[in-house]
Image (cartoon, rainbow, N blue to C red):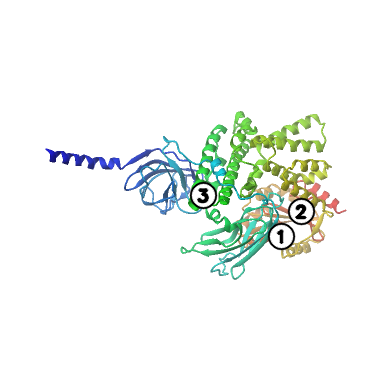
C-alpha cells in the first residue's frame, strides 16, 4: 500500500510539474512600439516556461507594404540581459513579406527562457536603426514601477552651463580606413549648420581626399549635435554623428569592423566625451506617434502620457546598459523632451492642416481646444523651456518652428489683426509691438510659464529675423528697441544686437560674388545674357514645393520671358549631371524654352555652401555687373514679380 501511494504521488508530481513551470499572461500591456511606420506591433500572449519564453504577436502594417523580421531578434529584461530567438511560427525570419489586405499578420516567436518572475521586458528586432521594437511589455493587471523622467532629470546634474552660449570655431579632422577613390566611394561629407541664432542654414561640404582624409572648420554658437552625410554610403554607414562645442578639435576614424560594416571611432574633443550617447540609437522621434494620431485632444492627452512614460523607460534602460555619464544622461533627456514637445505640436499642426483641407474635419470643440492654451500647458508644462541643453538636440530647430507658428499663437494674432482692421486706430509700430506681446503671452500660457522662457524668447528672435526688413521698410523704427528689451536672456540679446549691426552695415543693395568655382558658373550665365539681372531658382525633382511653384507660375513666367531686363535660370541637382529620364520629361513639360541647368548632387551641395542655403526652393538675384543682391532686395520668386523688380531697380538708381 505504501509503495502504491508513492507511485501515485510521483505520477501526480510528474503531471503537475509542467503546470507549475508555466506562467501565461494574456493580452499583456506595453508602453509602446517603435519604428513600425503607419502601423503597430502588439503582444497578444506571453508564455513563461522553463524551456522557452513564447510570445504571440500581431503586426498591423499598411496593406501591400513589405516588411521582414530579423532572425537576430531578442528579448531583454529589466537588467538588460538578452534572450535570443530560438524558433518562429507563422512567419519566415529574414524574408520579405507583403502585408495582407486586412493589414494583420499573426506570428509566434520562441526565445531563450526569461525568468518566470519577470515583470517587464522588451522585444528588439535587431541592433541598429529602424528595428521594430515593442517596449515595456508587462501584465496590465499589475502596476508597472519605473523611473519617471523627473527623477532621471534630477539624478545627475550637468557639470556646467555657465559657458554654454559662446561662439567659436570647431575643427573636424578624420580618415576613412581602407579608402579607395573609386567610382562608388564617397567623395564628400555634407552637413548643415542649423543654429538658432542664424537666419541662414548654410550647407557645409568636406571633401574626402584621395588618401581618405578630410577636414572641415566652421563656427558654432553653442554645443550641439552635428550630422554629416556621406554623399555615397560606406557599408553600414551613411551618417557621421558628432557632438561639438565651441573651440573643439575633433579627430575621428571611420573603420570597418569584423563584420565589414563601418563605425566611427572618436579620438578627441566633446564627441569622445559623449561617444556612448552618440553610438546609441536613441532616436526618440521613432517612438512617438502623436504626429500622425487622428483622435480627439482628450485621447491625444492619454496617448501623450503613455509615450512620455515610454521615452523615460527607454532612456533609463539605455543609460544603464551603456553606462552613460551624467553629461550623456542630461543630453539624452533634453533630446527626449524636445522630441516629445515637437510631437505634441505636430499633432495640433496636422489637425490644423486637416481643417484647412476640409472644414468639417474637426468639430468646433476640438478647434476651440487646439486654438486655446490649456491643452498644451497640461502636456508641455513638464518641459523646462529654460534648459539650454534643449538646443543641443538635432530636432530643436523643428520645435522652435512649431512653437513660433503654433496654432494658438496664430489664432491670437489673428484676433488682434481683426480688431485693428475694424478700429483702424493703431499705427504700424503699435501693431507690431502688440503682436510681440501677444506671442509672448500665448507662449507663456502654452508652456505653463510665468516668465518669458529661453524658448519663448528664441521664438520671437526668429520672428525678428523674418520681420526685420518689413520693420525698416514700413518705418517701424521703434519696434526693434521694443523687441530687444524683451530679450532678457543675455545670449539672445547679444545675437539680436549683432544681427541689427550686421543689417545696418548694408551700405549697398548688392555685394561682390565670393571667390570660388561657383562664381564661374554665374559669370558664364551673365556673359550669355549681358545687361540682365539673373533670378536663379534652385530646385529639385524630389521637392514638392519646388514643383508646385514651377507648375503654378507657368503663365506668370511666360510674361516675365518677354522682358529684356531679367532672365530666369533654373538649377537642379540630380544623381549625375546628365539628369534622370524623369527630370528631362518634367523639364520638357513645365520648363520648355527656359534656361535650365542640371548638375550633380555633389556640385549642387557646393552651390548651397557657396550661397549659404539649405532648403529649396531657394532664389538668388544677381545684378548685370555680377553682384549678389542682399536679402533686403533679393527677389523671392515669381509672384508680385513686376513690383519686386521695380523695387529692386529703384534701389540701384
Res 6 visible: yes
Q: What residue is shown at x 59% (from left), y 60% (from top)?
A: 230
The picture quadrant where one finds residue 150 is top right
Q: Nearer the viewer, residue 272 or 602?
A: 272
Horizontal arrangement in the rendering, residue 225 relative to residue 99 (left or right): right
Marks 1 and 3: CB-CB under 8 Å? no
First in sequence: mark 1 vs mark 3: 3
Q: Tell me the mark number nearer the camera, choosing from 2 and 1.
A: 1
Q: Nearer the viewer, residue 179 or 578?
A: 179
* Residue 128 screen position, x and y as percent: 49, 54
* Residue 25 screen position, x and y as percent: 37, 39
Marks 3 and 2: CB-CB under 8 Å? no
Label 1, residues with CA under 10 Å away: few <14, some 14-19, many ≥20: many
Q: What residue is shown at x 49% (from left), y 62% (from top)?
A: 261
Q: Secondary structure at mark 1?
A: helix
Horizontal arrangement in the rendering, residue 47 relative to residue 242 (left or right): left
Res 610 label? 1
Res 638 label? none
**What residue is pinned by disc 3?**
319
Res 101 visible: no
Label 3, residues with CA under 10 Å away: few <14, some 14-19, many ≥20: some
The residues tagged by marks 2 and 1 sit, at their Cα atoms, a distance apart of 27 Å
**What residue is pinned by disc 2?**
561
First in sequence: mark 2 vs mark 1: 2
Q: Is residue 559 positioned above or below 218 on the image? A: above
Q: Is residue 191 positioned above or below 177 on the image? A: above
Amino acid at each position: 500500500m505504501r509503495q502504491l501511494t508513492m507511485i501515485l504521488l510521483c505520477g501526480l508530481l510528474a503531471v503537475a510539474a509542467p503546470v507549475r513551470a508555466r506562467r501565461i499572461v494574456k493580452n499583456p500591456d506595453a508602453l509602446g512600439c517603435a519604428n513600425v511606420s503607419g502601423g503597430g506591433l502588439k503582444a497578444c500572449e506571453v508564455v513563461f516556461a522553463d524551456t522557452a519564453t513564447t510570445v504571440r504577436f500581431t503586426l498591423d502594417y499598411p496593406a501591400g507594404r513589405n516588411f521582414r523580421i530579423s532572425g537576430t531578434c531578442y528579448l531583454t529584461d529589466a537588467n538588460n540581459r538578452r534572450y535570443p530567438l530560438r524558433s518562429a511560427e507563422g512567419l519566415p525570419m529574414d524574408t520579405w513579406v507583403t502585408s495582407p489586405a486586412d493589414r494583420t499578420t499573426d506570428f509566434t516567436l520562441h526565445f531563450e527562457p526569461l525568468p518566470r518572475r519577470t515583470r517587464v521586458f522588451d522585444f528588439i528586432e535587431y541592433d541598429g536603426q529602424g528595428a521594430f521594437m515593442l517596449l515595456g511589455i508587462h501584465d496590465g493587471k499589475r502596476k508597472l514601477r519605473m523611473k519617471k523622467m523627473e527623477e532621471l532629470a534630477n539624478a545627475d546634474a550637468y557639470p556646467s552651463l555657465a559657458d554654454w552660449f559662446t561662439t567659436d570655431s570647431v575643427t573636424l579632422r578624420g580618415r576613412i580606413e581602407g579608402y579607395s577613390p573609386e567610382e562608388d566611394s564617397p567623395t564628400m561629407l555634407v552637413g548643415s549648420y542649423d543654429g538658432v541664432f542664424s537666419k541662414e542654414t548654410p550647407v557645409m561640404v568636406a571633401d574626402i581626399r584621395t588618401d581618405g582624409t578630410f577636414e572641415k572648420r566652421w563656427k558654432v554658437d553653442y554645443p550641439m549635435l552635428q550630422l554629416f552625410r556621406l554623399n555615397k554610403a560606406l557599408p553600414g554607414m551613411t551618417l557621421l554623428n558628432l557632438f561639438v562645442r565651441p573651440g573643439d578639435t575633433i579627430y575621428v576614424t571611420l573603420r570597418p569592423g569584423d563584420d565589414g560594416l563601418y563605425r566611427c571611432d572618436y579620438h578627441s574633443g566633446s564627441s569622445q566625451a559623449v561617444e556612448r550617447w552618440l553610438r546609441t540609437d536613441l532616436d526618440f522621434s521613432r517612438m512617438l506617434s502623436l504626429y500622425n494620431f487622428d483622435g480627439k485632444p482628450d485621447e491625444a492627452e492619454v496617448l501623450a502620457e503613455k509615450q512620455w512614460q515610454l521615452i523615460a523607460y527607454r532612456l533609463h534602460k539605455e543609460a544603464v546598459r551603456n553606462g552613460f555619464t551624467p553629461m550623456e544622461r542630461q543630453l539624452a533627456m533634453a533630446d527626449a523632451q524636445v522630441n516629445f514637445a515637437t510631437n505634441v505640436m505636430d499633432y495640433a499642426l496636422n489637425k490644423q492642416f486637416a481643417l484647412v483641407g476640409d472644414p468639417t474635419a474637426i468639430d468646433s470643440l476640438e478647434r476651440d481646444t487646439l486654438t486655446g492654451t490649456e491643452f498644451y500647458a497640461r502636456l508641455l508644462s513638464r518641459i523646462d523651456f529654460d534648459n539650454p541643453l534643449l538646443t543641443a538636440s538635432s530636432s530643436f530647430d523643428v520645435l522652435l518652428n512649431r512653437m513660433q507658428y503654433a496654432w494658438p499663437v496664430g489664432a491670437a494674432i489673428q484676433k488682434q489683426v481683426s480688431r485693428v482692421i475694424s478700429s483702424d486706430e493703431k499705427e504700424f509700430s503699435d501693431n507690431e509691438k502688440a503682436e510681440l506681446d501677444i506671442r509672448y503671452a500665448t507662449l507663456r500660457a502654452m508652456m505653463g510659464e510665468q516668465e518669458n522662457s529661453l524658448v519663448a524668447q528664441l521664438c520671437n528672435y526668429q520672428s525678428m529675423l523674418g520681420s526685420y526688413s518689413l520693420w525698416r521698410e514700413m518705418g517701424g523704427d521703434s519696434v526693434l528697441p521694443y523687441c530687444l528689451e524683451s530679450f532678457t536672456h543675455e545670449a539672445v540679446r547679444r545675437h539680436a544686437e549683432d544681427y541689427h549691426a550686421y543689417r545696418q552695415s548694408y551700405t549697398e543693395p548688392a555685394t561682390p560674388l565670393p571667390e570660388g568655382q561657383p562664381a564661374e558658373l554665374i559669370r558664364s550665365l551673365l556673359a550669355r545674357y549681358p545687361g540682365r539681372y539673373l533670378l536663379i531658382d534652385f530646385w529639385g525633382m524630389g521637392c514638392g514645393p519646388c514643383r508646385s511653384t514651377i507648375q503654378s507660375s507657368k503663365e506668370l513666367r511666360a510674361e516675365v520671358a518677354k522682358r529684356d531686363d531679367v532672365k530666369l535660370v533654373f538649377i537642379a541637382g540630380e544623381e549625375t549631371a546628365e539628369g534622370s529620364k524623369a527630370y528631362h520629361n518634367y523639364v520638357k513639360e513645365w520648363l520648355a524654352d527656359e534656361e535650365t541647368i542640371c548638375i550633380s548632387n555633389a556640385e549642387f551641395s557646393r552651390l548651397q555652401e557657396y550661397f549659404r542655403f539649405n532648403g529649396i526652393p531657394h532664389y538668388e538675384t544677381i545684378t548685370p555687373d555680377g553682384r549678389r543682391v542682399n536679402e533686403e532686395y533679393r527677389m523671392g520668386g515669381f509672384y508680385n514679380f513686376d513690383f519686386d523688380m521695380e523695387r529692386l531697380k529703384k534701389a540701384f538708381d
